[in-house]
Image (cartoon, helix red, strand yellow):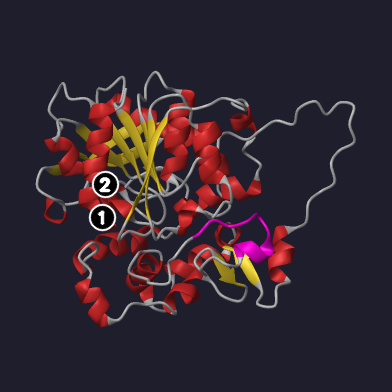
Amino acid sequence: MTALDPLPASVLPAGVRARILPGINGLDIHVLEAGHDKGRPAVLLLHGFPELAYSWRKVLPALAAAGYHAIAPDQRGYGRTTGWDADYDGNLNDFRFMNLLCDAIGVLFALGHRTAEAVVGHDFGASVAAQAALVRPDIFKRLVLMSAPYAGPPSVPFDTADRKPPPKGPDIHAAMAALARPRKHYQWYYSTRPANENMWRAPQGVHDFLRGYYHHKSADWKANKPFELAGWTAEELAKMPTYYIMDMADGMAETVAREMPSPGEIAANKWLTEDELTVYSSEYARTGFQGGLNWYRVRTTGRLTAELEVFSGRTIDVPATFISGKSDWGIYQTPGAIAKMQKVACTNMKEIHLLDGAGHWVQQEQAEAVNRLLIEFLKNAR
């Protein structure tokens, strides 16, 4: 990938600037920042999929006004950050979670901060944020998770030397495929070779694909009425919308095309205008989606989780909070995760906030409420 210029000021809110930080863990990392006066405490913001640093455009100015240096990078595989391999057959090791954490620490240090008042992660960015607070609480003083509960590091089997290996559980993917309406899990679909081409070369074009995708997972799609599932079974998982448990024959482009908002709904959308969506669609039209999809492949293959098992049994003890939309199925897509986050994984989880009028894109759909909660947490958490 060739070097790129930062996002132009014309697409950014007042007070937010874009720049490239060269030579960080093999990358040239594109960041957005606000409140970049010397001496301010840092807040690091980590986006998810299919997002960008731009997803924090409504949060950055509010944090700066509250006295913080707000920093949002395009993470490895995304946007105007370069130096990562976009080939499906490239080196997947670069996308393992400890390396993503190394990227994040590199950004913080490059900007002159030894610590951050908080690390904030949305969607898949929450996995990196949680890892940051778990592994380096000396750097990351607080944790904010959005839309994706963290259930703790993978466990290592214990007291097994004199026991027979437990029987293997049922194949969840075979069970979903065998349903009367055959289904498949989106994360395993995202790990397949055709997924990138399906979205990048979507029949409706990248812009309309992203419009449909963001709409389908937002509170604007009125069928998003999530509830806790009884367990990790095909029958229970199939109760979720098709953006999570897809119809077997469809790619994601076809899935979201069925839920495309009307021209009137698009015109009425204030949290993601057409001009704002164009920033996303222009970036993804250039890069494709493979960089972000590699994060899913790291998780679904299981080949790169051994280093995370080093932290088995360790808890996140820094002050933490969770923010999501009431219409966000992401809270429940892994049954039991939100309870485990509260009761086991995070020993100092202050509160869980589920906001009206927001689905999965909570910091965009309900930016004012998110900003208020973030700043209250930063000022009050000890």
Residue 366, numbered circle: 1
Q: Residues within 10 Å of mark 1 (few under 14, many from 20)?
A: some
Residue for point 65% across, 55% down: 232
Q: Residues within 10 Å of mark 2 (few under 14, many from 20)?
A: many
Give the magenta range.
227-237
Q: Confirm whether the magenta stretch covers residue 235.
A: yes
Q: Are marks 2 and 1 in contact (CB under 8 Å)?
A: yes
* Predominant secondary structure, magenta span: loop
* Disc 2/disc 1 C-alpha distance (Å): 6 Å
Which residue type carries mark 2?
Answer: Val
Instruction: Measuring from the top left, give residue 70's x and y in whole percent.
Output: 22, 36
* Image quadrant assignment for residue 172: bottom right
Q: Confirm whether the magenta stretch covers residue 3.
A: no
Question: For this rendering, which residue is in front, 82 or 67?
Answer: 67
Question: For this rendering, which residue is in front, 204 or 90?
Answer: 204
Q: Secondary structure at mark 1?
A: loop
Q: Which residue is mark 2?
A: 370
Instruction: Measuring from the top left, give residue 237's x and y in whole percent.
Output: 61, 62
Which residue type carries mark 1?
Answer: Gln
Q: Secondary structure at mark 2?
A: helix
Residue for point 20% across, 31% down: 69
Q: Is residue 370 left or right of residue 13?
A: right
Q: Is residue 92 left or right of residue 103?
A: right
Task: Judge whether 219 appears above or below 103 on screen.
Answer: below
Question: For this rendering, which residue is in front, 337 or 175?
Answer: 337
Q: Is residue 298 left or right of residue 133?
A: right
Task: Tell me the quarter of the image containing the C terminus.
Answer: top left
Residue for point 55% across, 48% down: 90
Evaluate whether residue 34 shows in this view: no
Instruction: Measuring from the top left, give residue 276's x and y in whole percent.
Output: 22, 62
